[in-house]
Image (cartoon, rainbow, N blue to C red):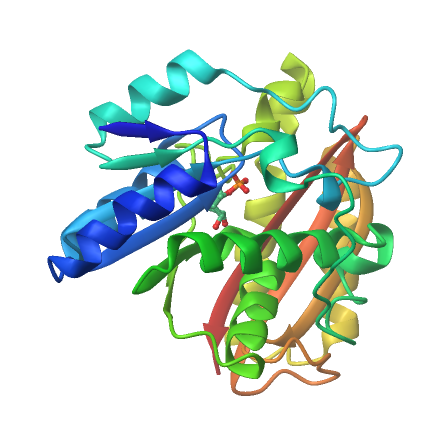
Amino acid sequence: MRIFNSIHSLRGAIKILKSRKKRIGFVPTMGALHRGHGSLFLRSRRENDITVVSIFVNPKQFGLREDFDAYPRPEKSDILLAKKEMVDIIFYPSENEMYRTGFLTSVQVDTISQILCGKSRPGHFRGVTTVVNKLLNIVAPDVLYLGQKDTQQAVLIKRMIADLNIPVTVRICPIVRERDGLALSSRNCYLSARQRLEAPILYRALQNAKQKALEGEHRSLHLGRFIRSTIARQSSGKIDYIACVDADTLAPLRRLRGKIMIALAVKFGKTRLIDNIVFSL
Ligand code: AMP
């Protein structure tokens, strides 16, 4: 496994790989790697000759009062995990390498960046699409791997790639969960013991709502109320949003039909967790 800190040297290596006709899979991450990231690495390894993973805690996607400083940065164990997962290349740039003095540009996907998570995290998705655009320009992969866990992010990035004619294929990988259903997240380490016990209620509530929908309850309002009361009764979580939307476009649905996603964001203390479930009617 090779580790690059500079854009210039990584580009040199990629150029050589491309001249040898190697197919490149790319997984962008913010580090604090877990089995969820690992599932993306594995899929990329299976489908490509070379897997590139970036580790960069992107300051532009954190709000002023968010956890940029506190975000876990376990460099050594990340590198060990990537090695174990047989990642070929890690791109580990500094903030200065990615955002040189004078940096002024941003990439924004309109409208769908302002809803759901975008509502309570203004500017977040602009930061995400800007950094992913930069990373795609640097790595120039054939295939980009993203997790269904960050579903709004995935929809936005797909939109950006289509709108800006970026020559890359996108693969969305399923959510990896703990045994009790909690979606793996680098932020789960912030949870107190009690919050950690409560947090699996998010997925249970989503599963129960899906069941209700399959049994005939197609009114979003009612499903939303049901999830809200389940979470309120069984945990200390404070709900940011619960939304029933079209899984491909994120358009809100008053009545469920087609390919549906129920998505939610809930705060346990200062820790904001997101989760979602996708199904068809
Ligand atoms: P992050 O490091 O949180 O920015 O995540 C990097 C990539 O890993 C994103 O595409 C995430 O959607 C994906 N990811 C994070 N958690 C999970 C999970 N539990 N299961 C599958 N993919 C995940």
Give the percent coordinates (x, y) of residue 135: 50, 52
Regarding residue 227, the answer to whether it shows in the image is no
Residue 5 picture quarter: top left
Q: In this view, does 107 lie above or below 185?
A: below
Question: Residue 102, can we see it?
Answer: yes
Q: How far across and how far down the image is residue 141, in percent?
A: 33, 59
Using residue 58 as the reference point, say whether residue 4 is left or right of it.
left
Residue drawn at x 57%, y 28% is 94
Q: In this view, does 18 lie to the left or right of 105?
A: left
- The relative height of residue 199 versus residue 265 in the rendered view (above or below) is above
Looking at the rendering, in which quadrant would you find the N terminus?
Answer: top left
Residue 111: x and y in percent read 78, 76
Number of numbered discs on residues: 0
* Identity of the residue furthest to the right in this view: 65
Residue 13: x %, y % from top left: 27, 43
Q: In this view, does 218 lie to the left or right of 54?
A: right
| Viewer-proximal residue among 217 and 280 | 280
- Residue visible at 52% across and 87% down in the picture: 258
Q: Is residue 276 left or right of residue 106?
A: left
Which residue is at the front of the view, 138 or 255?
A: 138
Residue 117 in which image quadrant: bottom right
Residue drawn at 57 percent across, 69 percent down: 155
Q: Residue lying farthest left?
A: 20
